[in-house]
Image (cartoon, rainbow, N blue to C red):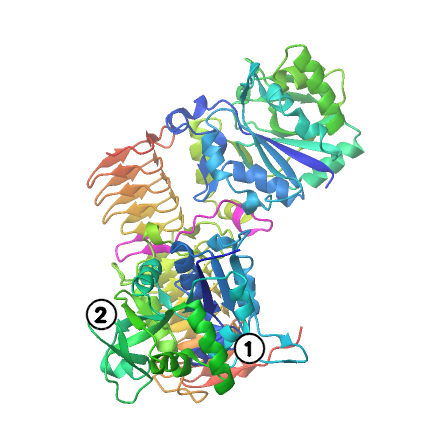
Amino acid sequence: MKKEVIAMLLAGGQGSRLGELTRKNAKPAVTFGGKYKIIDFSMSNCINSGIDTVGVLTQYQPLLLNKHIGIGIPWDLDRRSGGVTVLTPHLKGESGEWFTGTANAIFQHMAYIDSYNPEYILVISGDHVYKMDYSPMINFHKKNNADATIGVMQVSYEEAKSFGTLVCDENFKINLFEEKPPEPKSTLVSMGVYVFTWSVLKDALIKDHTIHADSDFGKHIIPNLLDEKCDLYAFTFDSYWKDVGTIDSYFSANMDLIKTIPDFNLYETFWSIYTDGDNYAPSYCSTESDVRSSLISEGCEIEGTIHNSVLSPGVLVESGAIVRDSIIMKNCVIKKGSFVEGCILDEGVIVGEGARLGLGENIPSKHNPKVYYSGITVIGENTTIPPNITVGKNCVISGATTPEDYKSGLLDSGEYLIKEEVAP
Amino acid sequence: MKAIGVILAGGNNQRLEKLTTLPGRAVAAMPVGSGYRAIDFALSNMTNSGIRKVAVIAQFSSSSLHDHLSSAKWWDLGRKKGGLFLFTPFSSSYDSSFFRGTSNAIYQNLRFFTRSNEEYVIISSGDSVYKMDFNPLINHHVERNNDMTIMYQERPDLDVRQFGVLTLDKDENIIDFEEKPLETNLKTISLGIYVIKRELLIELLETTNKEGRYDFVRDVIGRYRKVLKFGGYKFDSYWNTLNSISAYYKTNMDFLNKDLRNFFMKEYPYIATKPKDEPPVKYNVGAQVLNSLVGGGSILNGCVENSLLFSGVYVGEHAYIKGSIVMQGAVIGNNCVIENAILDKDTSIKDGTNIVGTPENPVIIEKNRHI
């Protein structure tokens, strides 16, 4: 069966700068905006753009991601023809290999693409938070009779150093592309959204495979196509787009959502974001509750105070507990009289009665100062914090901790406590 | 599973007045508990009990149910074998088949029963809010060797004249049954939930329909109550049915009770419903929400107390909502006061409007109305 356009969604990356949040979970499956996973934005963009065939390439810690995607029901991607297919690295004959680069991942799944005999393929990433209609970009590609079209946006000069930057003429034809240049010649950067004419990309992938074992779009494929005088165009996107690749940017992008008029609006009915909801009940606030400037997801039960925070489904906040400037993920329990400020609590964390989290000075982490430096304390999934413990800033805690793990009931700023889990 | 399910969702919808008559809505499609429709309870009970084949029989305003049930997969009933069957009246060249009664409605779809091979049939109303496992009911039915078992409750709190009233002996055998009696001092009511052998049901339906008797309660239960062995099964958990405005209001307000809310919403198995894909509820700076349930996608700027808000509701600044039920998509302007009211879907209330009723007599703002 033929499909004119199919999407290949790269969801295999770890997102190592998200620290504890991606230790047991791939970045695309990290919770965002209360009830969503980061991959939901790209998946929803596909179906909202009318693309009904999506190959999702997974590699790092795929369990949660695979369960989340399932057969694609939340996105209406459970189809008789097309739909969603999870594509993994696999053995071929006697050997096999991991995905070694973004283009290599697509190369390894050319048979999947060929089975739909598409004219064009859309290559996107499951790491980004944005709402985009891909169809004008595909039309732009067709109109230009292009070989490849790259989604681009304007950033600051400093930010441009960490992106693929490009220079194009007045018709948006690309003349120059540089991957992460120390001195960018332009502040127009690639946002990791590509449309390729499949026959062109296929040839390029086969050719590059013999040259680079770690074939990558930004490093190899795009520069090669330019060298070969192919027609590459830039399609500008000027709406909200975030990579949320660090604890700091992840935190602030979540906080952006709670402004009275947010930069990124989840409430537009014409571009719904879909996710795998567990049929949760409505949320409940008791007579003692005080909830302001916050997002509260389904099934939460709030008896305490919540200010400037984002809560995922099924969170229980008991009376007298105070949560401020924090991200609280699915099924966490914040017990009576506890205090949580400037923290990210991964799924299923239990904060004991009277515990106080996020106090003290902003001392960078002794565990990993490159990841934990902005003052935010991160608590790993299913971690238990004993009652009446005090925890500082930039701390990392993981596992079922007991009072004995905290010297005089305290974990100072910048300290960490990672307990190996007991094998089930 | 040894049973198939039947949900009667076609009943008289006059009793909920303009909540059902004006939008053309079946009672079974009434929004309940800030996120559900009434039929979700019976339907989830069936699938949670392991029933894999369910017929929903609708008559009045069935389009409201068609929309909700358009995909059966949310109740795990999107199946190649079994699954969900929605039966509505249809016309053929020789007969217009408007259902002439509940028993006639089942009889017209007799092939659903003759083509099944499960031993028992569970029949439930689609208008009731309850949560139960039907397996103990079936076991009780088998152990007592009943021809039909009827679930009942003692309900001194209700006007029993609106229900079927049972007289039971000490072994829970039904010795008398009266539908909607004019005068009675009995307090034992039928909950409209029955279990019966499939083959016996087919036989009774064929006989009564041939005789021109079309009502399940009157012509099957009433007529055969002394010929067949009918037994009772006491249901000692929460059960209410949406048979009046006040029952609708009270049943919804019951969800503000913590134990009941946990029973329905937090304890496995869960009540399933069609997902709405709404974002989280947004509490802005002026929000103050006390003892209330809020559905997904709502945006709150004002005060909400002792109320149920369904999904996608907007509450303006300095608005005050108390003791009210606000359905999906309603917009309440700044500085409004809404007390003891039921705002139907997609109503919109202009800034500064006051709407005040009493808990006994809540003001109803009908669907799509702009004030």
Task: Give the residues in magenta.
Answer: B264-288
Q: Which chain is home to disc 2?
A: A
Q: Which chain is home to disc 1?
A: A
Give left or right: position of B187 versus A330. right
Q: Please determine whether, in this image, residue A221 is positioned above or below residue B65.
A: below
Residue B25 spot, x, y in % from top left: 43, 29
The answer as to whether the residues below labels 1 and 2 share one chain is: yes
Hey, what amino acid is under mark 1? Thr
Quick one: A401 or A271, which is closer to the camera?
A: A271
Identify residue for label 1: A401
Answer yes or no: is residue A375 visible: yes
Residue A380 spot, x, y in % from top left: 50, 74
Hey, what amino acid is under mark 2? Asn
**Which residue lies at the image location 20% right of the left edge and 41% below the top edge?**
B351
Main secondary structure along the magenta-highlighted residues = loop
Q: Is residue A310 magenta?
A: no
